[in-house]
Amino acid sequence: MSKLPFVGDGLRLRVDWRTSVALTGRVVKYLAVPLLVPLVTALLYGEDIAVFAVSIAFVFLFGFVIERAAPEPDLGPREALLMVALTWFTVAVVGTLPYLLAGMGTDSTLAHPVNALFESMSGFTTTGATVMGSISLERHSHALLIWRQLTQWIGGMGIVVLAVAILPELSVGGAQLMDAEAPGPGIEKLTPRIAETARALWLVYAGITLLEILLLFGLHLGGLAPNLDGAVAGTDHAAAAYNAIAHGLTTMPTGGFSPEARSIEAFSAAVQWLIVPFMFAAGVNFALTWRLVGGDFRALLEDTEFRAYVGIIGVFTAIMTGLLFTGGIEPASAAFREPYGAIPGNVEASLRHAVFQTLAMITTTGYASIDFNAWSQPLKYVMLFAMFVGGSAGSTGGGIKIVRWVVIIKSVKRELFTTVHPEAVSPVRLGGNAIDERAVRGIQTFTLLYMLCFGAGAALLMLDAARVGYDISAFEGMAAAASTVGNVGPGFGALGPMNSYLNFPDTSKLLMVFLMWIGRLEIISVLALFTRSYWQS
Amino acid sequence: MRVVIVGAGEVGSNIAVDLAADHDVVVVDIDGDRVDSMSYSHDVLTVQGDGSDVSTLQEAGIEETDMLIASTDDDRTNIVTCGTADIFPDTFTIARVKSPQYLRTWERGERAFGVDFMVCTDLLTAQNITGVIGLPTARDVDTFADGLVQMAEFEVPPESPVVGQTVQEADRFASLTFAAVIREDGIVIPRGDTVIEPGDDVVVIGSPESAREFSSAIAPEQSVPRDIVVVGGSEIGYQTTRLLEARGFAPRLIEQDEGRARWLAEQLPDTTVMQSDATDREFLERENVGEADVLIAALENDQKNLLAGLLADRLGTARSVAVVDTVEFSDLFEAVGIDVAVSPREATAEEITRFTRGRRAENVSLIEGDRAEVMEFEVDADGDAVGCSIRDLAAELPNGVVFGAITRDHELITPRGDTVIEVGDHIVVFADADAVEAVTAAL
């Protein structure tokens, strides 16, 4: 007879949490590898390498130790959910180390652990909201700012997807892991082996990132990007390369961090135009991009979600171009003659800022080609609305996702139809295929939860701000919640693209860390962990 | 010719009766009673046993048999039977199946399952129904050359605008050939100056579109239906709806079973599927079924089909088509008010009989019993006709032959005197009974 531990069945955990912890450790251990990038940067610029050397050692050891939690991890569906949520949280926590170490003894706002966690979570979840007091290379090292950019690049395609691509032991439960992490209602296997699929996705992602970096640098060489190097156009190659890499690392993941305090406004129109197609690509399902690379144009053109994506961007761009062309500047900010005064009546500038800002909001990149805080209220409302659209499923974008909107609109239409014809059986179709009713329900539930998180988040943020006497408007509070849960980045007013989230109380910052975390993992897979039935039955 | 028929159900016995006059027929069935009744009532040899068992087939004399027809009610039994008979290479095998799934597999392969010819009951029935619906005035419709060519027989009503016109005047459609005019006193091969009289039956061959145009030309008030209601999501109901969708209709389909209704709705994007009892009068009224142009009853049994058809008739539906399983009920259905009764078994038996008659042709359609035939031939490399023009070929053939249509590389060509026949062409020819032999020999 075997000896069972003397606990009632009701208390027995049905989740092998040790497996999840151990596998989290394994992933965290490998975080030491990307930390080599800022280390090398520090060496190149002759900056302090101790920060990153210590971080690498600590991250590796920490991962190594918690990996011991289970010698032979056996990954099931429940363990996968826990592991993904845990990995993202742990990586964000561990990722604060460089901020904390570099901030020690300085007046950097990131020396505070809550601020560091906010910045780190905002980075890995590709939100792009910042609490950095002053973003500039004078105040922070090149190495630290490149680390900040790099966290977004790693988080973009997914830490777990990367782990599945590299670590063979994750391939069996890999599909579940990727499912729990991937943006959108499900993953699409491109190849019979999940590890190969993960590799393919990362390859496309890395390839496009590299292309963007090269093109940005090309603009510099061509003299079209005078501000890229901060000096005379086409001269300072090192500074231009740094900026090209830094922005390349945060476009494809729809991140939005920039080592420039003025975001993309700091750069020329040519640079802004160049970033537009890359933001667009970042919001497209990478499985489609993979097929496109393989020469399959039709898959892209026939994809319902892609067509909706293009259509929605077109509509938003048209509205914003119109508003900008006919004015669109807050009278109060008429004092800023440049660059705002140059937009009304100028087709190129209106179109450029409209398409740039539409893409930045819809794909949840969060870049700013201009301080849109100075824009009129209607424009800001349009942009707030755009935050809820989100990228395509299987892209790096956050938000609710196009495909969910398509399904929701179709299910609403169906509901209206069956009101008139109660006996009609009409499945919701996507690209000719009927969608399972469970999936439709899942999408409706997700969207409802998303809205609930947004509403509750906005209310709590405003209450918390009122508690400490921090003055934000209802619009700003809503924008903060929408921006964090959707992984967008900038908000409006005090949280505008050139400002920061610094003045929120710590409790609010922690709430936003939570919102960013569950937003990146699409809410349900995290919230499921907080239910009794997940742990017990 | 010696023919073995496996399965002595309605289809099998119908075929047996049709063939017994000219051929030696052996009927195999697993049911002793059926075998007995068959051997008492008809001049056929009977064997009791499992047709998919090689020893049973041997007992039926499969070694000397030219053709085996597997027509039990079970698809897989029929396929296995043909596969078994395929051991004897001289036997031509015909399988009757209900599910189109097997037909599709068979069409893709070269003699898949060892079956030489496959008849799909449900698909055939669905094709018959859609043919009847698509051409409201047609008495008979058949398709050739993978659906590129349609043969249709129309009755010209006395009030039709084409009455009194010559064929030349009436034939305004580019890809349509007037093959024959059938009158009380015989078949007339039309020439340009033949005048169409009321009550004539006109046989035309051409593209499905032109046949449809012609249909509305002879009876403009009976336009093509818009609102079609299919009752019953059986395989026949499903296939019919699918074919209607393929022709651009957006029918309504009523199915009672929840799971089946969902499945149908998933398969049929252009159809409004409703889950309800089709004999629920309140529902039918609420959904305005009475205003439909056509109602097709394809429920699970004859009684329900009759009830649904009559109910629709009472509600005011313009035309009702009902599937009738039991062949004898067909006339009864039409007598009590169903406009068209379609019998899958009869259609299958007819199709198989037709096939056994015209072995040389790819496809045959019988006109007015067997007074004439429309046949499809594929021209192979060693055929005598290769390189001949239609004019030369026609000169060698007796009167009563009309070249209706030619398809080349899946495109329809309307044959003219100077059209030269090439290898691989599919030729659709009308021939009256006396000329069939000559045409078969020439092509």
Image (cartoon, coloured by chain):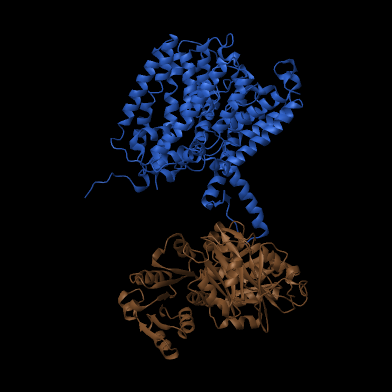
Residue A336: give x, y in percent of width and height.
Answer: 72, 16
**For residue B174, above or below residue B326:** above
The residue under the point 53% across, 80% down is: B326
The residue under the point 52% across, 52% down is: A436
**For residue A383, above or below residue B410:** above
Locate residue A314: give its quadrant: top right
The residue under the point 47% across, 24% down is: A151
Residue B275 appears in the rendering: no
A168 lies left or right of A365: left
Q: Give the quarter of the figure containing the N terminus of chain B.
A: bottom left
Using the image as rendered, state which of residue A176 and residue B63 is in the foreground.
Answer: B63
* Number of disc labels: 0
Residue B175 appears in the rendering: yes
Spot the residue most to the left. A1
Locate residue B58: give its quadrant: bottom left
Using the image as rendered, state which of residue A481 and residue B322 is in the foreground.
Answer: B322
Spot the residue most to the bottom. B40
The tint of chain B in the picture is brown
A457 lies left or right of B136: left
**For residue A91, above or below residue B40:** above
**For residue A487, above or below residue A225:** below
Residue A218: give x, y in percent of width and height.
Answer: 54, 19
Using the image as rendered, state which of residue A406 and residue B34 is in the foreground.
Answer: B34
Residue A396: give x, y in percent of width and height.
Answer: 52, 33
Residue A43: give x, y in percent of width and height.
Answer: 41, 11
Q: Which chain is blue?
A: A
